[in-house]
Amino acid sequence: MKSLGSIRRDFAPWNDPKAKPYIQFDGVTKRFGDFTAVNNLSLTIFEREFFALLGASGCGKSTLLRMLAGFEEPTAGRILLDGQDLRGIPPYRRPVNMMFQSYALFPHMTVENNIAFGLKQEGMPKPDIEKRVADMLKLVKLEQFAKRKPHQLSGGQRQRVALARSVAKRPKVLLLDEPLGALDKKLREETQFELMDLQQELGLTFVVVTHDQEEAMTMADRIAIMDKGEVMQVATPAEVYEAPTSRFVAHFVGNVNMFEGKVAERTDKATRITGATGAQIVVENGAAATGADIIFAIRPEKIRVSSKKPADAVNALEGEVYDIAYLGDMTVYHVRLDDGQIVRASALNAARVTEDPLTWNDRAWVSFRPDAGVVLAR
Amino acid sequence: MNATWSRFNITSITLGFAFLYLPIVLLVVFSFNESKLVTVWGGFSTKWYVSLFHNQGLMDAAWVTIRVGLISATVATVLGTMGALALTRYTRFRGRVLFSGMIFAPLVMPDVITGLSLLLLFVAIGMDRGMTTVILAHITFTMCFVAVVVQSRLVSFDRSLEEAAMDLGAPPVKTFFQITLPVILPAIVSGWMLAFTLSLDDLVIASFASGPGATTLPMKIYSQVRLGVTPEINAACTLLIAIVTVGVIIASVANKRREVQRQLDERAAQRG
């Protein structure tokens, strides 16, 4: 069975028409004065989903999260959680908890009192609180730090305290605002996997806000890519990468080459595109009508660079090697086509020895399969 | 930086400290003077301290001053903290700039004007002058100092702490008392201490606002000095200086210790 990307997903309630939505944003708009932070946005998140809101700063993703937590009320539209309209419910009565970007640990309380704070608010009996706090400390491996104050902890430990505190109440939904933003790169990668394991273990619904696409791709079941207060695409990481639906998404996630052109001819199986400067490209999966102005987008790793034209290539364009970067695991080529466009291609260095080495200013061919790219509206 | 003691440095330091502390040193020395004459040394004695405690007038004045200071500093701290909260939190209300300017104006207002206007007010509303009016006057002029101190702390206060508390189920009032107040408490305490000190040594405003039976220590000292300085007054002032010095030393040592401990903790946390 063919599938996009390299992962087969068994958990996919969004493809199941009978699945009940857990969180629903229904035509939500939020304005601050003249500025529209979120514009008529609708979105559905399912139970036990790890959902990421991805976008540049100022795209409205944090506002969306804060509306879910109850710190902001929508100007228009409604937000439903498990069927209940959240309008007018203050943050302290919502069954969601948030992990803050700054962690917001209470500086005058010990680690265990920080974790116990939420449990005390709901009036849990003392022995139960002690047990839950001990469980939480064990979960984040901070047992021996229970009596410490936040300033006596390292950045990674603080992050784990914040996490333990926000899941201690077993919320219906955990909101994470740039949860790994303050950690260094190595720790961030480790923590990404820890968060995923934690979500599996607790069976909670996670909604994470991030500007880091790698983070979103690693952790999330589905990603909503946002721009200027609107959702551009909601899809699995593989779909977002391999089948972006707009120029913005294709550009925002990963590297991409774009060819502007026109649909010259359509048959049942293939679409022939004529580039602006005459290059001919044949693709299998284009839905645009004949004569339409389109963009053909293709990822660098789907393009092959060779010194001779491959005999079986459907799409092959000739040019000159303009730049090469050897990165160890892969090599990135910039090839200037004869029509002037520069194409970025990357080759995985799967073997230590290369049969067909290239150097600067060599004549070269770039080739790709008919199903390697996507056709986007211009 | 030049680490050697040049002649110029030594001279300027000596002159500077002499300028600052010579009058105080003289006062302290002569409080232990045997002689009744303030300017003639007659040998060491502590008898003026003994007689000070038998001087009912001075002791009464000291008691009034302490009560005025405690009450006015406490009320001013509550009001000043509330003002600071309003000014930092509700940043969008109409006339905020005017209001925040107005709360700080008394900082630079000459004491004479504050005192006189308060006196006029008390007369106008027919309020008998006494300890109550002194307390009211002191609340008025120390409140803005508290507001300034607390506001500077609130500006750097991380609002997400409050959001986190509410997110975890604490309603706003509980959040304020369990999170906000403990975190800004050091600033409130320094505001209180500032207000108390200002109230202790105020002469001008108290003179305007006070009436019979409510003489504060500075007023008492000033009125006695007009009749001639007695070594008793020197002794009283020496005690005041001692109290203030001890207070300042304790506060700064505690502060320094906390700071050093915090830095050590943080370094240890980064290592571990």
Image (cartoon, rainbow, N blue to C red):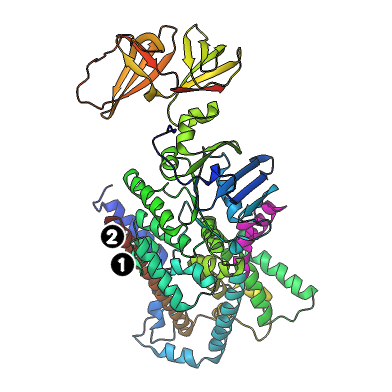
Residue B227 can be seen, yes or no: no
- B165 vs A138, nearest the viewer: A138
Mark 1 residue type: Gln
Q: Which residue is mark 1?
A: A144
- Neighbour class for label 2 at 10 Å: few (<14), some, many (≥20)? few
Residue B224 screen position, x and y as percent: 56, 82
- B215 vs A21, nearest the viewer: A21
Q: Quadrant of residue B225?
A: bottom right
Residue A17 screen position, x and y as percent: 59, 44
**Which chain contains the residue that carries disc 1?**
A
Q: Which residue is mark 2?
A: B268
Q: What residue is rendered at 70% in x and 53% in y?
A: B93
The residue stretch that appears in magenta = B79-105
Mark 2 residue type: Ala
Contact, mark 2 vs mark 1 (Cβ under 8 Å): no
Vertically, is A54 above or below B163? above
Residue B196: within the magenta? no
- B88 vs A263, nearest the viewer: A263
- In the image, is A38 to the left or to the right of A244? right
In front: label 2 or label 1: 1
Q: Quadrant of residue A59?
A: top right
